[in-house]
Image: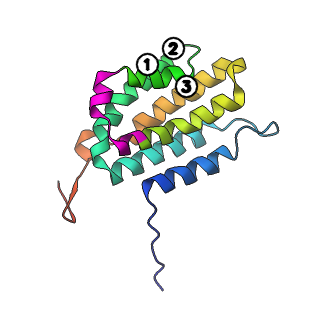
Amino acid sequence: MKLPSIRLPLSAFCLLCCFCLLAFTGCQNTGPIAKSLYVTSVSTGVALGVRRYPETKLYLQVATPIICAQAASTNVTPEQIIAALGNSPEATAAATPQGKLILNGALVLYFGIFDAIGIKDMPTLQNYLGWTCEALTLGLPPADKLRLNVNGRYLP
């Protein structure tokens, strides 16, 4: 017996992942999310998003170093991350609605943890932002591995 496949739109998938992961953050009796779970969740979401929307790869390639530069800084707030992305002419030029959705899906987990922990533990928050950088980098395919689906056929 063949099981039917379920096809979720990217936005529904991102929301589902975020709600599942945010269920483990913010509670006083729940510890922080392990690095492996965090990086795997974010990188998988990015990889699936780029696979579904290959045109978002350029935007994510431009935005990832911006987020990584923020991760190398200290005492970074979500507002500063958003401002850095908005102040980049390259990111603004390469932005697509789907690319912004994928990036927001990757950042929403960090923003949720930031809200749960607050500025009282900036070293921990800096670790999470560094993990976000790592996950974005892992989620992006190398240039030679991206194949476009054109008229039902994948281009080499």
| 137 and 70: which is toward the camera | 70
Instruction: Give the dominant element type of the magenta stretch: helix, strand or loop.
Output: helix
Q: Amino acid at mark 3?
A: Pro
Disc 3 to disc 2, how far (Cα)? 13 Å
Q: Tag 2: residue type?
A: Ser
Tell me the crowding category of disc 3: few under 14, some 14 to 19, or many 20 or more residues within 10 angstroms, Cα based: some
Amino acid at dot 1: Ala
Which picture quadrant has residue 90? top left
At horizontal 43% and vertical 19% (from top left) the residue drawn is 69
Of the two numbered discs 1 and 3 on the same chain, state the one appearing first in sequence. Answer: 1
The residue to which callout 2 is attached is 73
Question: What x and y, as percent, mark residue 25?
Answer: 70, 40
Instruction: Give SS at disc 3.
Output: helix
Mark 3 highlights which residue? 78
Label 2 to label 1: alpha-carbon separation:
7 Å
Q: CA distance from mark 1 to mark 3?
A: 13 Å
Asked whether 114 or 142 is in front, the reply is 114
Give, as a single range, the part of the protein colored magenta. 88-100
The residue furthest top is 74
Q: Which residue is mark 1?
A: 69
Tell me which residue sits at (52%, 26%) in the image: 130
